Image (tube, coloured by chain):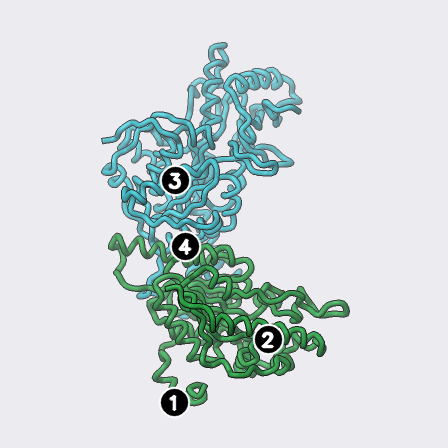
Chain colours: A cyan, B green
Amino acid sequence: MAETIIMTGNTAAAIAAKLCQVQVVAAYPITPQTSIIETLSQFIESGALKAEYVRVESEHSAMTVCISASTVGARVFTSTSSHGLLYMHEQLHWAAGSRLPVVMCCVNRGVGAPWSIFNDQQDSIAQRDTGWIQLYCRDNQEIIDTVIQAYRIAEEVYAPVMVCYDGFVLSHTMMPVCVPDTETVNSFLPPYKPHTFLSAEKPRNINPVIFPGMRHNSEGVLCDGYMEMRYKLQEALEKARDVIVSVGMQYAKLTGRDYSELLWRYKTEDAEILLTGMGSIATEATVAVDQLRQEGIKAGVVGIRAYRPFPRKAIQEALKNAKALIVLEKDISYGFEGALCSDIKAALYGTGLNAPLHNYIAGLGGRDVKAREIYEAVKTSLEDMKSKKAQNKTIWINCRR
Amino acid sequence: MNIVENFDLFAPRLINKKELLSGGHRACSGCGEVLAVRLMCKALGENTVIASATGCMEIVTSMYPTTAWEVPWIHVAFENAAAVASGVEAGLKALRRKGKIADCDIKVVGMAGDGGTMDIGMQALSGAMERGHDMLFVCFDNEAYMNTGIQRSSGTPMGASTTTAPAGKVSMGQKTWKKNMAEIMVAHNVPYVATACPSYPLDFIRKVEKAKKVKGPSYIHCFSVCPTGWRCPSDQTISLGRLAVETGIFPLYEVENGKYKLSAEMPKKLRPIKEYYKSQGRYRHLGEDEIKMIQDRVNKEYKKLLNKVQCLEAWS
C-alpha cells in the first residue's frame, strides 16, 4: 500500500532510488545534495537496499563509476549539485555517448564565483548539450515520481536522465509525499537489460577511438562513424518525447497522479497571459496567477517538465492563444538572455504567434522570489508591453540594477 | 637471467601461448609498451576486464571497428582509468551477489601511461587504491606524453629533452626529478606493489600473476621503452630496458604487505648510468657534470631502496 509521509525532497529522491533497487551508487558529498547519499548509505548499511556504494574521491569519479558499472549491467544512481555537476561535465558526455541509462539527481544550486550554496538552475542548464534527458520537478511528490519514471525512460531509450530540482526550496523542505509501494514500482519498472556489456565469454571494446568516416569491420560490414553515432543519440532524445509521455501515462494509471504531458498547466484554459518556467519558480508563479486573476487578468502557468528533449510541439500548442508571454528562469546565458527563453522563442518560430515576451531572470544564487514580486513584475510588464519598443525584453527582477 | 637466455627452451612451458592482444595493431616498431601489454594479458588470462586510459595503447589497439583485444576492454577518457575499473568491479560484485552473472573470478585491470597514472590520473588511482577495490592497476611508464608527441610528464626523468621541456641554450630539458609512483602506491598500504620491465618477461609475468591472486588492490609500475620518444634505435628496446635496470635507474623490486624485496634480476653491482644515456637522443645534450649529478641521485635513491629492503618488515 502506498503511504503518505512528510519528507524533504532529498529523502524522496533517496527513497525513489531504493524503490528502483539500484545496484551501484557512486556519489560525493556536496551541498545541497548530500542528504540523498547519506540516506542511501543508511539504507545500504542497514540492509534495506542491497547495493554497492562506491565512496568515490570526486564527482568526476562518481560519474565514471556509474558509467562503467552501468556498462557491466548494473542499475546505477548518483546525485550532485553545482560545482560537482560541472566537475562531472566531461563524464556526462561519456555517459550519453555510451548510451547508458544512468539516472542522476541534480539538486540545483548556483555556481561560483562568487561562492554560493544556494539555489538557481545555472548548473544543470550549463549541461544542456551533453546528451542527457533533463526533467524538472516542481515539488517533492514529483521528485519521487520522476526518479522512478526516469529509470523506465532511460532504460527504454538508452540515454541518461538528470532529475533536476531546486536546492533547499525542495531538497530541504518537508512536504507530504505519497510513496508508492514496492510491488507497484516492481510492476512498473522491469529489470535493466543492458544493450551491451562486458563479459569474458563475448569480449567487446567499449568506447574505442573512431574515425570521421564510416569503416568496414573485419567481416566487411560498413560500421557507423562518429556522426552516425551522434545522429542516433539525437534520434534517441527526439524519440524520448513520446517515451516520457507514455511512461508518464502508465505511471499515472498506477498511482493516479498525472504525468501525461511534457509540461504541466495551471489555469491555462482561457488564459491570455502565460507564464512559463521550470521547477519551483513555476510553482511560485501559480500563486502570482491567482492574484492576477483576482484582478480579472486572465493569466495561467505552463510549467516545463522536460527541458531536454525540448517539448517543441507541446509548447506551440500550449502557448498558441497567448497575448503576452512571461518566461521566468533561474539562469542566464551571459551576453544574451535566459536559456529557456531562447528555446521557447525558437519553438515558436514560424508559428505566427507574435505575442510580446518578457524574460525574467530571477532568484539567482538563492535570491528569494516571492509570488508578490512575480505578480508585480507581470503587472509592470503588461503596462510596458503596450509600447512597441518594449515587446521583447530581459528583466532582472528583485535585483539592484 | 639464465632463463631468459634460454628463452626458446623455457618459454613454451612458462608462458601462456594464447594471444589475448593480437598483432596488427598500430604501435610503433620497437614499442616496449605494447610488448608489455601483450605479456600482461598472457599472465592475466581470459577472465579479465581491462579498463584503459586514453593514450598510445588505447588508440593503437582499438581503432573502431577493429580491435586487437581478445578480452573485454573499456575506455572512458584519460584521467579516470582507476575509477572505470572501480565501477566495473563494483558492478560485477553487485550483479554476482544478485545471481545475475556467474559466480566466477574476473580480474579487473586498470591501465594507463605515466601521464594517465602519475599526473592527471593520480586522484582517481589514489581513490581506488584507498577504497580497496579488487583490482590491479598497471602503469606503463614511457616517461612522457608519447601519444600527443613527447611532452614532459611527472614521469619524465631529469635531463630528458621533450617537446614541452626541450633542451636548449638555457635549459637541460626536464628540470625536475621523476615522481616515484611505486612509493606513492606503497604509501597507500596496498597488499602488493611491484616494478617491472618487459625486458625481463618472466619476472614481469610472474609479478602480474602474483598481483592477479591478490584479493584487493595491487599496483605494477612497468618501465616501457619508447624508441620514438626517446630518440633511440627501435632494435634497442630490450637492451635499453635491461640497462635501465642494471644501472639502478629503474630497479626491479616488489613490496608485499609492506615488505620490500629486490628482484633476482638486480645485479650485485650497478653499471654506470652513462652507458644507458649514450644511445638515447633525449639525453644527447647532457654534459659530464649533469650526468654526474644524475648519477649521484641514482646512487642515493638506490641506497634508500636497499635500506628499505634490509629494514622494513611486513605488516601482516
Front position in the image: B177 or A383: B177
Q: Which residue is mark 4?
A: B131
- Element type at marker 3? helix
The chain letter for the residue carrying disc 3 is A
Q: Which residue is mark 3?
A: A38
Amino acid type at circle 1 is: Leu
Residue that appears at 41% across and 33% down: A262
Q: From the top left corner, tell me how far across and down residue B294 is, in percent.
A: 64, 73
The chain letter for the residue carrying disc 4 is B
Q: Nearer the viewer, mark 1 or mark 3?
A: 3
Rounded to the nearest angstrom, the CA distance separating label 2 from label 3 is 51 Å
Is there any visible trace of residue A342 in the rendered image?
no
Rounded to the nearest angstrom, the CA distance separating label 4 from label 2 is 35 Å
Amino acid type at circle 2 is: Asn
Amino acid type at circle 3 is: Glu
Front position in the image: A1 or B5: B5
Q: Which residue is mark 1?
A: B9
| Image mark count | 4
Location of residue A10 with respect to B52 vertically, above or below = above
Rounded to the nearest angstrom, the CA distance separating label 4 from label 3 is 18 Å
Whether the residues at callouts 2 and 1 have beta carbons within 8 Å, the answer is no
